[in-house]
Image (spheres, helix red, strand yellow):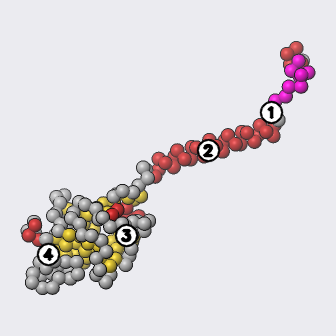
Amino acid sequence: MWTEKARSWRKNKKRAVSPIIATILLVAITVVLAAVLYILISGLTTGPGNKPLGTAFNVGTPQNIGVATGTTPQTGCTAGDNCYTMAIAEASGGISASDLQVQIKTPTGTYVAVTTISVLSISGTVLSTSITAGAAWSNNSPLSSTQSIVVDVHAPAFGTSITGDNLVFLGVGSFSGQVTVTLT
């Protein structure tokens, strides 16, 4: 039972899109929508583009290399200061010294005045400019596990030992989060 309108449509040989083309169009639209949805959702799970610091940088256990006043200090330390050295256990993802900010915090959360913090090679050669706490190194050279970090804290600046305090490395730039080690 064809209506007059349906008959005229068929007589003029007007046709719809073929089933094959319709199927291809439906599949293409579905793929494009799935790709757009994936991009939107993946952006939510990774955050604003910052890499977690703990996945790219870590240090070994700090070793107390404090030197007595009047003796020749170990490389990277000043006589009479509290000194700690720690090997870089992991440095990946192109992390450099300039991607780190360093602080020393007491268990109560107050900050300790730091004279210098240096990045040294295993042989003792200073690879990065010394900094004060709360600032980032200016050296953009990549860090590696063949280096160590030496923390030199001038004791008279606060009059006590830094044993038991936390050395906190904060991510700067494209790195976020922190890595904390306790000075023993």
Q: Amino acid at mark 3?
A: Ser
- Residue underneath mark 1: 17
Q: Position of residue 127 (x, y in %)?
A: 31, 74
Above or below 81: residue 170: above
- Residue underneath mark 4: 81
Q: Amino acid at mark 1?
A: Val
Above or below 32: residue 74: below
Q: Is residue 158 left or right of residue 179?
A: left
Q: Position of residue 136 (x, y in %)?
A: 28, 62
- Residue underneath mark 3: 141
Q: Earlier in the sequence, mark 3 or mark 4?
A: 4
- Give SS at disc 1: loop
Q: At x 85% / y 28%, what residue is drawn? A: 15
- Give SS at disc 3: loop
Label at residue 147: none
Q: Amino acid at mark 2?
A: Ala
Viewer-side residue, 153 vs 27: 153
- Inter-mark Cα distance, 1 to 3: 61 Å
Viewer-side residue, 113 vs 141: 141
Q: At x 49% / y 48%, what residue is drawn? A: 43
- Give SS at disc 2: helix
Q: Answer few, some or many: residues within 10 Å of disc 1's Cα (few below 14, many 20 plus, some between 14 and 19).
A: few
- Give SS at disc 4: loop
Can you tell which of label 3 and label 2 is closer to the viewer? 3
Q: Earlier in the sequence, mark 4 or mark 2?
A: 2
Q: Are marks 1 and 4 in contact (CB under 8 Å)?
A: no
Q: Answer whether residue 86 is visible to the viewer in this image.
A: no
- Residue underneath mark 2: 34
Q: Earlier in the sequence, mark 3 or mark 2?
A: 2
Q: At x 34% / y 62%, what residue is drawn? A: 99
For the image, the number of numbered tags is 4
Q: Which residues are magenta?
A: 8-16
